[in-house]
Image (cartoon, grey):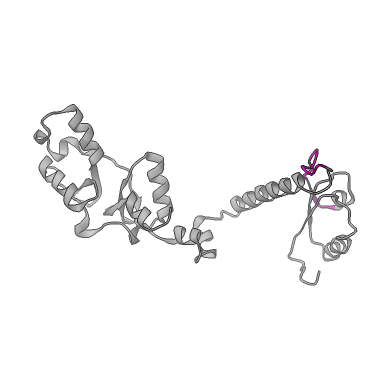
């Protein structure tokens, strides 16, 4: 009771709702004029009636064969607690960056803190092709850079399109003479991209949503910055 301050909220979880063990806590809360939230397993109880915000968390029967030990009711309390936590998280606009800042050393924190720019392929490692590039040049870029794709960019540096090994296989199924095509003929325009300052978790979610394994990365002006491959994320031991 000595650590309770006027800036606090008293949150009480009780199956019976009887105040024998918590009467002093309730009296302290009333003296300091702080709100009481009660998560009760019994709505017809003193605690439920005296709480500022009573929450019904009752169950029809416990899993205990004697209907005595809090089993089903304790599970219900956990579920309600998670629900309240998620509502509070949303109300406070708690972001993944906030989570990572509070858990920097843990597995989830490392996953959320690591940026795309730390693992993507940039500079000379980017498989590039011009609009007049030939199919042979595209295939050579795919194999030499070992990323399973080639990227085309505009004069402004923005991404013009991408052509992946999957696109190559589909093209081969429909056409016998692949080498008659130029890059501009087959490039896939307006591909999905991600900021190089985004966290890897966001990149992984985007890849999973669109079932892609290669993702062009861009800087804060939308210019091509690098290529992120799904294997880069796997190698970082984040999934």
69 or 215, nearer to the observer: 69
Residue stretch in magenta: 51-65
- Across and down, in percent, residue 173 comes to 20, 29
Decide whether residue 153 is among the magenta residues. Answer: no
Residue at the spot 39% in from the left edge and 59% down from the top edge: 115
Decide whether residue 64 is among the magenta residues. Answer: yes
Q: Residue furthest top?
A: 174
Callout count: 0
Residue 86 seen in render: yes
Relative vertical location of residue 107 with respect to residue 186 in this rendering, above or below: below
Residue 222 seen in render: no
Residue at the spot 61% in from the left edge and 51% down from the top edge: 91
Q: Is residue 86 left or right of residue 37?
A: left
Main SS of the magenta part reads loop
- Across and down, in percent, residue 123 comes to 22, 59
The picture quadrant where one finds residue 179 is top left
- Across and down, in percent, residue 92 comes to 60, 55
Relative vertical location of residue 177 with respect to residue 112 in this rendering, above or below: above
- Across and down, in percent, residue 66 comes to 84, 43
The picture quadrant where one finds residue 60 is top right
């Amino acid at each position: 009771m000595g650590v309770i301050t006027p800036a606090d909220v008293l949150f009480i979880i009780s199956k019976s709702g009887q105040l024998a063990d918590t009467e002093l806590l309730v009296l302290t809360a009333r003296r300091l004029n702080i709100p009481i939230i009660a998560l009760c397993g019994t709505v017809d109880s003193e605690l439920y009636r005296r709480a500022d915000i009573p929450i019904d968390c009752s169950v029809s029967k416990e899993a205990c064969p004697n209907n005595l030990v809090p089993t089903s009711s304790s599970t219900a309390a956990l579920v309600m607690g998670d629900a309240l936590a998620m509502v509070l998280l949303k109300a406070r606009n708690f972001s993944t960056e906030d989570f990572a800042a509070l858990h920097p050393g843990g597995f989830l924190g490392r996953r959320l803190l690591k940026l795309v720019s730390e693992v993507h392929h940039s500079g000379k490692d980017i498989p590039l092709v011009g609009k007049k590039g030939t199919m042979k040049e595209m295939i050579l870029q795919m194999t030499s850079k070992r990323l399973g794709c080639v990227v085309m960019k505009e004069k402004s540096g923005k991404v013009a399109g991408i052509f992946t090994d999957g696109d190559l296989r589909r093209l081969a199924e429909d056409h016998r003479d692949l080498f008659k095509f130029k890059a501009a003929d087959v490039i896939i325009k307006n591909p999905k991209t991600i900021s190089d300052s985004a966290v890897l978790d966001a990149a992984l979610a985007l890849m999973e949503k669109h079932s892609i394994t290669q993702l062009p990365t861009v800087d804060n002006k939308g210019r091509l910055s690098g290529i992120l491959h799904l294997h880069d994320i796997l190698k970082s031991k984040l999934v």
